[in-house]
Amino acid sequence: MLNDKTILITGGTGSFGKKMVRALLQNYKPKKLIVFSRDELKQFEMSQKWSTHKYPCIRYMLGDIRDRNRLMTVFNQVDYVIHAAALKQVPAAEHNPAEFIKTNVLGAMNIIDAAQQNKVKKIIALSTDKACNPINLYGATKLCSDKLFMAANVDSGADDTRFAVVRYGNVLGSRGSVVPFFEERAKTGVLPITDLRMTRFWITLDRTVHFVLMALSMAKGGELFVPRIPSMKIVDLAKAIAPKCKQEVVGIRPGEKIHETLISEDEARHTIQFKECYIVQPNARLQKDLLVNGKKGGGKRCPENFRYSSDTNNQWLTVKELRELVNQISDDYAIEKSRWSMDDVPQ
């Protein structure tokens, strides 16, 4: 499906974007692969690893999703879009709400307009667990974005652009995650814990790439794809990273939850459960099709009062498993850091 096609990744220089670029170059033969972002330095660094000389299909394009006219230009003749660009830091959102609305909400509207005008085949937009029953500004903007993408299918004809959303939990080892923060604070001998009861969903970058590509192939328009992933206790993560460090409870930050939810009870009424994921489908007719088509694959309705929450999850990462994951992430980061050393860049 992706061979000989033009694929564009917004926010393509982020942690997810780089993993997706690697996966697409290793496993497919795209006609053109566009890395779209607003950071010229990150694009320059990426081009040292994936140069246009070695990979003639790759294009680095500067721009901001806030700029509708720029999107109209770069979306020309694009077949598939993976929308990963967003402002994501919860504390920053609480203090800079207007900036998050401009990027996460108005930017989403620009993406939708540009895709429909240029007749893009499919768009997968990346969401977050914080968009489910949001209590912070970041989550609220992503919920609004999700609703915009799913509603966009109503305006599209049968053969026009299809929009779908992927919602998952915290990404282990991504920029801004708690892992590098804990590793740095471990040097002081004390790890700050916001709440001893806190739990989170966790997913690796490799798994997110696999899941987004699966959603891209399955999407017919309007779906919200949620992977079935494990939970972990924040105190267990602290033990895995620095077992000898003292844990100091510092209290919940503004906009933070004790537990995260990926599917609410209200959404569960429209949710079909599969072996690898859940699919929330607000359209009753399409939901019925999922059940019919999903018999061989095990698709079934979620039970009454179902809620997919990090504290009631039936999959949990142990301290040992977390330590192995953290060590793997640290090793991968060290390898990446050496590859991206500016000492190797020709002047």
Image (cartoon, grey):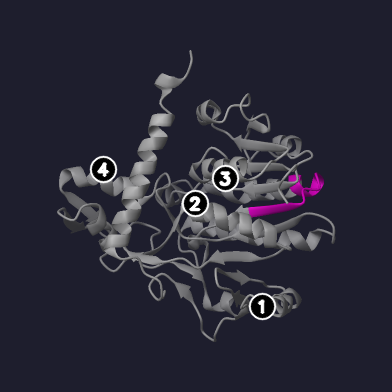
From the viewer's perspective, is residue 156 above or below residue 308?
above
Decide: few, some or many residues near mark 1? Use Cα within 10 Å; few <14, some 14-19, many ≥20. Answer: few
Among the two numbered marks 4 and 3 on one chain, the one whose residue lies closer to the N terminus: 3
Q: Is residue 247 left or right of residue 78?
A: left
- Packing grade of label 3 (10 A; few <14, some 14-19, many >=20) is some
Q: Could you tell me the amino acid type at mark 4?
A: Glu
Res 253 quadrant in image: bottom left
Marks 4/1: CA distance? Answer: 48 Å
Left or right of 262, for residue 270? right
Q: Which residue is mark 2?
A: 206
Q: Earlier in the sequence, mark 3 or mark 2?
A: 3
1 or 3: tag closer to the N-terminus: 3
Picture coordinates of residue 65 (x, y %)?
Answer: 63, 41
Instruction: For mark 2, give the secondary structure.
Output: helix
257 within the magenta span: no
Q: CA distance from mark 4 to mark 3?
A: 30 Å
Can you tell which mark lies on residue 184? 4
- Label 1 sits on residue: 296
Range covered by the magenta-colored residues: 114-124
Secondary structure under badge 4? helix
Mark 1–mark 3 distance (CA, rounded to whole Å): 29 Å
